[in-house]
Amino acid sequence: MAQLSDDCFAFGGTLLSVDAALALVAERVTPVVGEETIALVEAAGRILANDLVAGMDVPPHANSAVDGYAIRHTDLLPDRDTVLPVAGRAAAGHPLGRKVEPGEAIRIFTGAPMPEGTDTVMMQEDCILADGKVTMKPGLRKGANRRHAGEDIEKGTTALTAGRRLRPADLGLAAALGHDRLTVFAPLRVALLSTGDEVREPGSPLPPGAIYDANRVMLASLLRGLGCRVSDLGIRPDREAALADTLTAAAKEHDLIVTSGGVSTGEEDHVRAAIERLGRLDFWRLAIKPGRPVALGHIKGVPLIGLPGNPVAAALTFAILGRPLILRLAGAREEMPATFRVRADFAYKKRAGRREYVRASLSRDGDAVVAHKYPKDGAGILSSIVRTDGFVIIDEAADGLQPGASVDFLPYAEIIG
Ligand code: AMP
Ligand code: MG
């Protein structure tokens, strides 16, 4: 298990492009968790720690893809029907057990091993059986309806790569290779807290001037979705000493601390002061809109991500920077989230130099998918995310777009679904 260096988040510049930020994460952040071997049935969503190299072929033997008759292709007459005696039977789990002689057809069922000597299977729908003989049409290609040994996974090849977040089909593949256990990274233990004297627990009375904590439940759910084990440290008041105690305690039993609020540059930003007293803090100002700086730091060797308090800013910065960083700490080698092209139905003006994430919903218009911009786009308007499907991304270089433009769309399902 590795430990990050205290200055791994050091960043001297003023504004950081998304690509540069992701490159820094890839370069400087390594997994901070150990490995464990667990039962295959428990492994969905976990992160594979080592490449899984196939110790066998899948399928292990050549077999029939259909119900029919296995033959030697050379026995088929090229220009008229062929009649062959049915000389045996092979079913799934019940191989024929002998070599097939020229001129024999073998009754065969899906999944049955190809009898030695045969190379082709004629589907039963294309045959006529009478008096123990099968009549077959001409024209079947050699090798038809036969599955090769190893055609799914060949022995010695890498079936699953280290760092992969295991999906149900991955578990199926590991099972097909005979594994009942997998070595995965231990879950990232994350301490999560909200800060702010005005922030209150939902379900409790709301005094004048207070608001309910929208961020914590959202972030807890996002973190769990990434496979983290989340400790809920609740809401902490804006008092440096109390925050310092909480952070010190949290650092003892966690691999990561995630906070929201209290880390901009105002004089009420006590999280920032507390962290700077205990460890090191750097601010990454991403060249994105909407955006706020993300605080990245260390408390006694444990990394900390300080997200902005505004819920939309918290969600977006989590999606763009927090998520890849957390996945990397957890051992994942995640591909970039998939975007696709859609048609914008709105005009948009922006300043060049920043990447803008426009909340939009999708609809169909014939063959086209059309993105509609949500009318309200304030950084505190969480309903704008609830009521839309994802972000239209307008790149740094662009200064806006016209209705009808083809644009990149990043679905929430890829990042904060
Ligand atoms: P801050 O980052 O602490 O300056 O907060 C920025 C804005 O986000 C303020 O309007 C806060 O009241 C609001 N805010 C902070 N934390 C939360 C939270 N957990 N849930 C909802 N709003 C929050
Ligand atoms: Mg605050």
Image (cartoon, rainbow, N blue to C red):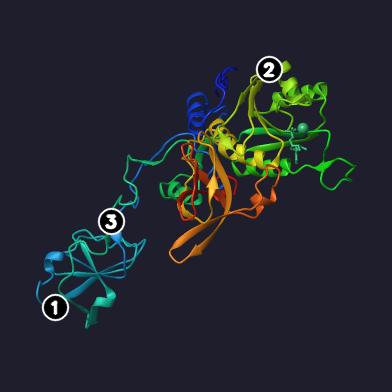
Secondary structure at numbered mark 1:
loop
Instruction: Check disc 3: other Cα within 10 Å, few if <14, some if 14-19, many if 20+.
Output: many
Where does label 1 land, which residue? 81
Q: Determine whether 276 is above or below 169 in the image.
A: above
Pick the quarter of the image with the N terminus.
top right
Tell me the CA gap for discs 2 and 3: 61 Å
Secondary structure at numbered mark 3:
loop
Closer to the camera, 140 or 371?
Answer: 371
Closer to the camera, 247 or 207?
Answer: 207
Q: Quadrant of residue 65?
A: bottom left
Q: Nearer the viewer, mark 1 or mark 3?
A: 1
* Residue 136 horizontal side relative to residue 407, left or right: left
Closer to the camera, 397 or 366?
Answer: 397
* Residue 396 horizontal side relative to residue 239, left or right: left
Quadrant of the displayed image that contains ligand 1:
top right
Q: Position of residue 403 (x, y in %)?
A: 49, 54
Give the residue type at disc 2. Gly
- The mark found on residue 279 in the picture is 2
* Residue 193 horizontal side relative to residue 181, left or right: right
